[in-house]
Image (cartoon, rainbow, N blue to C red):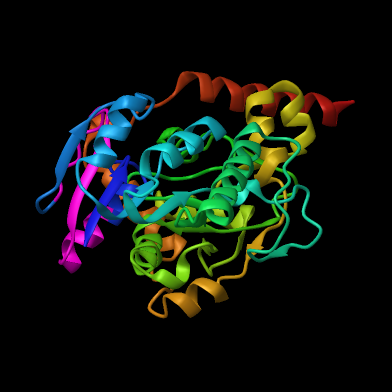
Amino acid sequence: MKLLFIGGTGNISAHCVELALRKGGYEITVYNRAQRKVAFDGPVTTIVGDRHDRALLRQVAESGHYDVVADFIGYTPEEAEDDIRAFTGQTGQFIYISSVAAYQKPPHDYLMNEATPLSNPFWPYGQNKAISEEILHRAYRDQGFPVTIVRPWHTYGRGVVPTSLAGGGYTTVDRIRKGLPIVCHGDGQSLWGLTHSADLAVGFLGLCGNPLAIGEAFHITTDEILTWDQIYQTIARSAGVAEASLVHIASEMIARYYPQQGLALLGDLAYSSVYDNSKIKRYVPEYRTTIRWAQGSAASIAWMDADPARRTVDDKLNAMYDHLVSLQQSWLSV
């Protein structure tokens, strides 16, 4: 099977490439700007270029009929339209990597399935994913464009320790080890889940080449549901610390002082969320969660600890943590 990955070296896509190489039977091409070097354990053809170069994108599409094309770095409606123009008639299946951030926020029900409305009034990222999905579905309805939609949740891989405010780098781990306070949005009891990219790759590859998946949308998310307090305390234990010092601040207050973080909070992370994986399990029976958060966080921190160059502390994130903690202390003293 011939696979083309638009992207192919990112947090999710690299694991999908690696799984395809391990399973065998795939001829893999990745198309990206070659800014991130990944040493794959097998033959991978690389086409270097910018996905916004429409002429090159069309040239790549016409260079050989791909059984499956997967776009991991499509974020805007314009990019979805470019995909349709380039790959119409050039692939048997087009997989668009969307996001659960496209879903209705705030949700009417904490338990969501693929029929949950797409409506995010807070976060442009989620809005653009929803609009892109509609453009692709319309192309499927009107002209038979063979699209499959995949909606990941909060997904991480090796060397990533996801948090709600500070990305997935080492800064939060460093603060926990130094006994410094960590800001957790809300009361820390909202429900969330973290999907390892290696697990997601199983569901993704199971959809590749499946004609029944065309015209459909799928969650590929973890079945392990945790509170945000549990997520942070698991990071602490993985870092060799008995307990993290957590400071709880309302998402709306964080958004007031740090609007960029507020977009992701109010547009996604602040709400209890559980995603029904029954559909992906019907189409890909082998899909299941195999890497639990305790295992994944420990592996990521061990990877960071193996090389001092990987333990980068972000001074701006530290300043944000300290500022929010000081604000909380001043509010409590009033």
Q: Residue at x 9, y 51 (%)?
A: 43
263 horizontally vs 42: left or right: right
Pinpoint residue 50: horizontal percent, then vertical percent.
31, 26
**At x 62% / y 47%, what residue is drawn?**
134
Q: Position of residue 153 (x, y in %)?
A: 54, 54
Is 43 in front, or is 200? 43
Depicted 318 relative to depicted 248: above or below: above
152 and 332: which one is in front? 152
User: At 28% across and 41% down in the image, what residue appears?
Assistant: 61
Residue drawn 29% across the image and 54% down it: 15
Q: Quadrant of the N terminus?
A: bottom left
On screen, 210 above or below 227? below
Front residue of 91 and 260: 91
Query: In the rendered image, which quarter contains the C terminus?
Result: top right
122 on left or right of 153:
right
Q: Is residue 257 magenta?
A: no
Q: How many marks?
A: 0
Q: Nearer the viewer, residue 85 or 222?
A: 85
Q: Quadrant of residue 198?
A: bottom left
Location of residue 237 in the rendering, given as x and y in whole percent from the top left corner: 45, 55
Q: Please provide percent x and percent y for residue 252.
A: 79, 34
Eyeballing the image, is 334 above or below 294?
above
In the depicted structure, whether residue 323 falls above or below residue 27: above
- Residue 18 sits inside the magenta stretch: yes
Query: What segment carries the magenta color?
Result: 17-40
Residue 289 seen: no
Report whether 46 appears left or right of 265: left
Judge from the rendering whether residue 14 lies leftward or rightward of residue 238; answer left or right. Answer: left
Does residue 129 appear anywhere in the picture? yes
